[in-house]
Amino acid sequence: QLQASGGGLVQSGGSLRLSCAASGRTFSAIAMGWFRQAPWKEREFVAGIGSSGGRTYYTNSVKGRFTISRDNAKNTVYLQMNSLNPQDTAVYYCAATPRTMDWYTNPYPSGQYDYWGQGTQVTVSS
């Protein structure tokens, strides 16, 4: 089970930190990701992190602005979002998969993830 939180309304240039708390599995053995879906758009990959936290991936539009991290002791993954702009407005979802070997070959498709949180709204005003 995944529970995302931390969304809200922020002005352009501002920051937010999303959190995703996981339960029910061995957290340190699963890869995690963040996706987002804007109105009338498909869900897209934002960032992913391997089970130990040593490998991270980002979509090009957020590189240098967003940072994904995890705390395995707290069963939580984070997405620090800086320099937000209105194009970042979306519902953000966290996702998880225990299929780490598959994940390491290609972390980007939503189909690589087996478990999804409920989403948290991020709105960036101009």
Image (cartoon, rainbow, N blue to C red):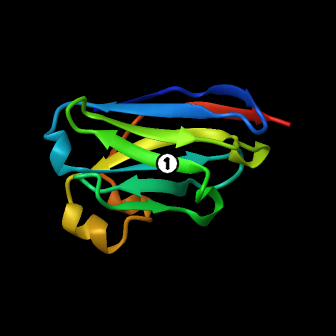
Q: Position of residue 100 (x, y in %)?
A: 22, 61
* Residue 113 or residue 11, whichever sits in front: 11
Residue 95 x %, y %: 37, 46
Residue found 17% across the figure and 32% down from its top? 24
* Label 1 crowd bin: few (<14), some (14–19), many (20+), radius 10 Å: some
Figure disc tally: 1
The answer to whether residue 118 of the structure is visible from this angle is: no
- Residue extending farthest to the right is 126
Q: Position of residue 9 (x, y in %)?
A: 70, 25
Nearest to the observer: residue 113 or residue 15: 15
Q: Quadrant of the N terminus?
A: top left
Quarter that holds the C terminus: top right
Label 1 SS: strand
Residue at position x 75%, y 49% in the image: 87
Residue at figure coordinates x 16%, y 49% from the top left: 29
Q: Position of residue 8 (x, y in %)?
A: 64, 25
Relative height, residue 18 to residue 66 (above, below): above
Q: Residue at x 71, y 34 (%)?
A: 14
Question: Where is mark 1, residue-wise?
Answer: 67
Amino acid type of disc 1?
Thr
Q: Quadrant of residue 25?
A: top left
